[in-house]
Amino acid sequence: MTAATARRWLHLVVGGALLMPYFLFVGTVVLALLGVPDFFTDPPALALTFTLALPLVAVTALVPAARPPAVALARGLTGTAPDALADGPARGRVDRSRTACWYVLHLGLGGVVAGATLAVPPFAVLLLALPVVRPGPGSPYALPTAGPALYLAPLAGLALLAALAGVAAGAGAVLARAAPVLLGPSPRERLERAERRAAELAVRNRLAREVHDSVGHALSAIALQATAARRLLDGPAAEGRAFAGEALSAIEETARRTVGELDAVLGVLRESGPDPGTAAPGLAEGLPALLDRTRAAGCRVTVRGTPPPGVLPPPLDREAYRIVQEGLANALKHAPGAPVLLRLERTASGLSVRVAQPLPPAPPGPSAGGGRGLAGVTERARLLGGSATAGPCGGDWVLDVTLPTGAAPVPRTGEENR
């Protein structure tokens, strides 16, 4: 017998135990109405009691709270996949009806299997021992005491045990197949589960974007500053010390700011911090410091146009800062010494961001760096109702982003994937 069959057998025995209160209640009524002295010894009364108990089971199982314990038992004992069963109380009429059908099936089969489990093994043991131990004169069983039947009794005992195991395995298999049908989520619950999963994935994707854009940019800048400082320290002492001091100051400032942004992102993972988007400054507020850090890393940046504070809505302002940050980080990564043109232009419909740089020997993009940052830029623009393109253009590598100023606030808890 496999472990799955044993668990299902136990599940059926539990069903038989749950049936007993209904069985005894109906049996008491049957005894009173039919005048039967003991329905356990009267097969017709026993069958009638069992049959009348099942509708009572169905009525009580229509309560919405009846489904969670049934699901918990089914998950643990029938071997059904957890995702195949519903979560929470049954809310609709169809869900409650399916739950009632499950209880009738579970307790009905469980009553039969539990009764057989109690009755068959002792009788089978008696048959196995019959050639050696004779039953007393008061035995209720009509058993052979001589002849070939006496010595065939052990085989009959083994057959009874095998039949019991087969019936229990078959009934358990029926329950395992019926569980997803009767206890599975309805189409509405499947949709809600998919929406919750999409919301979780959206939060994870947003955290990944924030970590990539903030921490990734900072680490790229720190690595370039440290490399340049090390090389100049090998040159003239005065010039090397002066530049190394500036580079170390830039590294210190970048690291301090990045720690704050990283703490905000980790706070979301701990469910105790603000939204990671609030850790990003606005474009007008954070652009000067971002340019200083980028130039300290050796990137020559020319800026044309800067939106004044308060012109852009806060969500758009923060997302525009992240987009510019990723564009400059991409330029640092692929061609740190080349000049970069950053153009910020306020248009009639919104904001236009353009980052242009002479094409390096290996153009930046998905083939050169995995494209995660540029994919994040495209996703940010799309969520705001804008667009983003990146690629060669007239001898330059250009990132063009258009953001409408009338965009709705950026989703923070997964609405973007719904």
Image (cartoon, grey):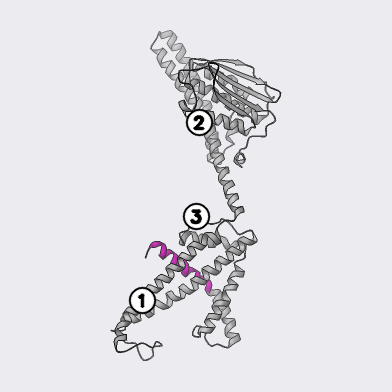
**Residue 417 appears in the picture as rendered:** yes
Q: Residue 83, position in %: x, y?
A: 51, 53
User: In this image, 219 relative to 92: left or right?
Assistant: left
What residue occupies the far bottom of the structure in this picture? Answer: 137
- Quadrant housing the C terminus: top right
Residue, disc 2: 372
User: Alpha-carbon distance for marks 3 and 1?
Assistant: 36 Å
Q: Which mark is residue 82?
A: 3
Q: Where 249 falls versus 20 (above or below)? A: above
Q: Earlier in the sequence, mark 3 or mark 2?
A: 3
What residue occupies the far right of the structure in this picture? Answer: 348
Residue, disc 1: 159
Q: Amino acid at mark 2?
A: Arg
SS class of the residue under badge 3?
A: helix
| Of marks 3 and 1, the one in the foreground | 1
SS class of the residue under badge 1?
A: helix
Main secondary structure of the magenta stretch: helix
**Residue 16 appears in the picture as rendered:** no
User: In this image, 379 relative to 225: left or right?
Assistant: right
Part of the protein shown in magenta: 1-19
User: In this image, 113 relative to 352: left or right?
Assistant: left
Q: Earlier in the sequence, mark 1 or mark 2?
A: 1
The residue depicted at 51 percent of the width and 23 percent of the height is: 330
